[in-house]
Image (cartoon, rainbow, N blue to C red):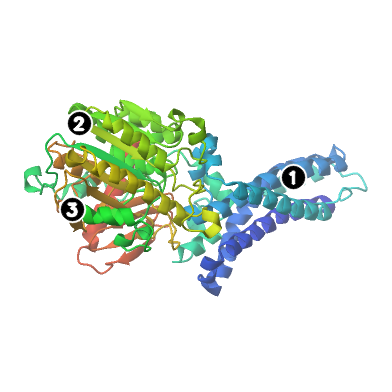
Amino acid sequence: MKRSIHFFLKYYLFWFLFFVAFKLLFMICNVKATLQMGIYDFFMAFFRGAKMDLSAAGYLSVLPGVFLAFSSVIKPETIVRIIRGYTLFFVIIVIIMGIADISLYPYWRTRLNAQVLPFLSEPVGLFSSISFWNFAFFIIALFIIAGGVYVSYRKLFPNNLLSGSKIKWYVSPVILLLTGALLLPIRGGLNTSPLNFSSVYFSKNLYSNQCAYNFFWSFNHAITHNKLKNNPFTYFLAEECKKNIEKVPEPKPEELPMFVKGEKPVNVILIILESFSNKVIESLGGVKGLTPNLDFLGKEGILFTSFYATGNRSDKGISSLIASYPALCRASSIIGYPDKMKDLDFLPQYFKRNGYNFSFYYGGDVNFYNTRMVMIQAGADQIISSSDFPEEIASLQKWGVPDEYLYQKMYNDLINTKQPFFNILYTISSHDPYDIPGYVKVKENNGLNYFNSVCYADSCLGVFVNNLMNSQLWDNTMLIVTSDHATPDPGPTMYNDPATYRIPMIWTGGAIDTTFVCNAVAMQTDLSTTLLQQLGWEAEKSYFSKNIFGDKQYAFFFRDEGWGFLSPETGFFTDKESGMQQFFYGEECDKTDSLQRFAKSFTQYLHNDFLKR
């Protein structure tokens, strides 16, 4: 019996130490952030995170415990081999998850969770994001770590560990009892509430809390809780919630300024740049010299300096810009749910009702993130994607068609397009792995870097705008340039930092005869209401979209960990699990209480609306 109990306890400890080692590896790979967390937080990440590591180890020890209970009726050597095979399988799986967690963190600034699910269901998108060297590093790291872990396991659990005298029958119920006891660490103790992220949350430094998380537990928790069945935010009764949102009425359209002066109907082109933030645009306070064309356009029209993405992924940007529906505090967006998407108020549909031709251009696979379905529901007359280009062009980048060819295709089509038209072009070249053929302006990593891709994307935009300005279309065309979402780099900035969501928006073109800088705080969902008013059309009333030129000034961003609110008076981030608020500014502002009520009501109403659809 002693040998069996010893085996069981040592096996559980094996998985616990495995996760502790991966925690240390994660912190080493993010050494800059780790050095800033302080000695106390460093050790507390291990101490507080141990509860989640013990839970993850418990999940992986249940089946071996059941196998071990049969050692009284099956040869112990056979049981040892079965457990070894099980362990090798899960060691490989968990190491793959651990390496993915380490690799994705610099881009997502969050631990491994259900955000990866859309990539798993769309393998093309997954492999498009991985360069050859990334893949090679992944495989090498997998073999090295898995080899080291397996050798260690063989030394800890040799074939003869349970050999000797026959294991008695009463060992089985004892081992089963111990296996059942794993429910305690799995659940996180005897508390009323089961283990969750707030159980290991201990610091105001969010990176410190992230270090405490266990990637295996986090991913499995995200999968099992991926479906939003109940509103995680219930701050007020439903009637009070709605009243808090309605307190500030929208201005009448005739009371707002008009900046679109072209001969009606005006052509509109919406350019959505992949992964662009203000941090890479000099005129918006970013890095110098990367985007001269965007800087030029900002001086030629209306430059919005405080425009925010509502989420951190492409699908969330699309739902916000095209359907005026914000991101949610969950892995996926509303466009992942066709049954909920059917009644959305799509911006392109207004153009269709007014006799416009609507075309959508995308350099990648248009099926990714349900994009084709979105555009068809929005009324697209024409959808152009990578499949419409020759293979030698469509395969130049892993994500598809480089920006220069996409812009050229749309420009050639515009010359022959019946006016008025509404066109959307969605770029891909500034998406990792940044494999732009033959273009190296920023030489770091042979041009395979974010800054180089930004320079390339800006140069392609510049060529397109120059061609458009020299055509007869320019005088009666409005050009809107914005982004689907921002990135942690440069910085990198944390996932709750407003800079991680601040994106560019520029209105220019011959139909815009004014130039000024708009500092109003706004978000992606506001584009629709504002643009429609400028074109003389009435938008359907929505609590999620407001006119940027009105009195209301605020923006939200949402992600798995919580939600952020920004206004001229105050800004804060609310952690979903703990409810803890981190203020960026304005904590003592006179309006803080009323703005918090409004922000909480908006968040509650949004998630209720999603559930009801």
User: Residue at the location (53% across, 36% down)?
Assistant: 124
Give the mark, 2 or 3, whose residue is nearer the N terminus.
Answer: 2
Q: Nearer the viewer, mark 1 or mark 2?
A: 2
Residue under circle 3? 552
Q: Are marks 3 and 1 in contact (CB under 8 Å)?
A: no
Labels 2 & 3 near each other (Cβ < 8 A): no
- Front position among marks 2 and 3: 2
Q: Secondary structure at mark 2?
A: loop
For residue 115, side relative to residue 611 (left or right): right
Q: Earlier in the sequence, mark 1 or mark 2?
A: 1
Q: Residues within 10 Å of mark 3 (few under 14, many from 20)?
A: some
Name the residue rendered at 31%, 28% in the picture: 380
Regarding residue 230, the answer to whether it shows in the image is no
Tally of numbered tags: 3
- Image location (x, y in percent) of residue 521: 24, 56
> Which of 14/359 is in front?
359
* Nearer to us in this view, 498 or 393: 393
Amino acid type of the residue tagged 2 in the rendering: Pro
Left or right: where 257 falls relative to 564:
left
Mark 3: which secondary structure?
A: loop
Residue 526 is tagged as: none
- Would residue 267 be found to the left or right of residue 562 on screen? left
- Judge whether 71 appears above or below 340 on screen: below
State the residue lying farthest toward the left: 254
Q: Residue at x 10, y 48 (%)?
A: 256
Estimate the spatial distance between the alpha carbons at disc 1 and disc 2, rounded to whole Å.
62 Å
Question: Residue 171: horizontal and vertical position, in percent?
Answer: 81, 45
Tell me the CA gap for discs 2 and 3. 31 Å
Q: Which residue is mark 2?
A: 420
